[in-house]
Amino acid sequence: MSITQGIHHVAYRCKDAKETVEWYKKHLDMDFVLAIAENKVPSTGEPDPYMHIFLDVGGGNILAFFELPTQPEMGRDPNTPLWTQHLALKVADMDTLLATKERLEAGGIDVLGPVNHTLFQSIYFFDPSGHRIELACDISTPKMNRALDKVKWDMINEWAETKRAPQHARWIHDGTEPPEV
């Protein structure tokens, strides 16, 4: 059993705290729950003014951002592909996913998807600071989940040795049925 009880908050940097609060409220209905601002970093004592904002993602989860006006302009890790780093948020169902896609597009936001990942369907887009956001709707079945659970250790062990994609769960991508477990 994990010693942790969940995610207290996940923090990213943003370009503009007020714009970020307004964007997430307008496009994803996230409530603004807290703002903390200091001229020194509490953990290190470094002089570095910041605005730290907290948004309610739902389910007791908090998404936070720091605006750091004295730091160089934020960028991305040039060695990590754009599609890799993202924040995936769960939505209730396909109707919500599709309605949110329409809402985002009506707000002038480019949206990719829905993309069918067999276990879930997703849409992808970027927030005003350039963070890639994924909204995902679970569509997996208990049979799929059992099949994946059965092969997870075989897959990670094979990957650790070969650094090539194991084929134990190929059914996710080739359209065949998962094996009976």
Image (cartoon, rainbow, N blue to C red):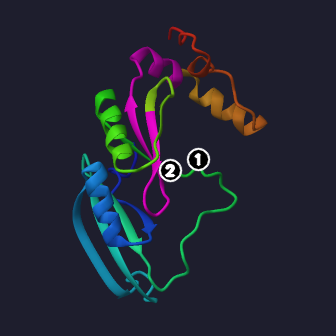
CA neighbours of label 1 inside 10 A, class few (<14), some (14 to 19), many (20+): few
CA neighbours of label 2 inside 10 A, class few (<14), some (14 to 19), many (20+): some
Q: Secondary structure at mark 2?
A: loop
Image location (x, y in percent) of residue 91: 32, 37
Q: Secondary structure at mark 1?
A: loop
Q: Say left or right for 176 vs 62.
A: right
Q: Nearer the viewer, residue 102 or 179?
A: 102
- Bounds of the magenta span? 122-149
Report the residue at 40% width, 36% height from top: 136
Residue under pointer 2: 86
Instruction: Judge whether residue 133 is colored magenta.
Output: yes
Where 16 sits versus 155, above or below? Answer: below
Image location (x, y in percent) of residue 130: 50, 60
CB under 8 Å between discs 1 and 2: yes
Where 36 sits versus 118, above or below? Answer: below
Q: CA distance from mark 1 to mark 2?
A: 7 Å
Indicate the quadrant where residue 106 lies: top left
Q: Amino acid at mark 2?
A: His
Image location (x, y in percent) of residue 115: 50, 31
Q: Nearer the viewer, residue 109 or 159?
A: 109
Task: Kindly tell me whether residue 161 is visible in this rendering.
Answer: yes
Residue 83's tag is: 1
Quadrant where the N terminus sits is top left
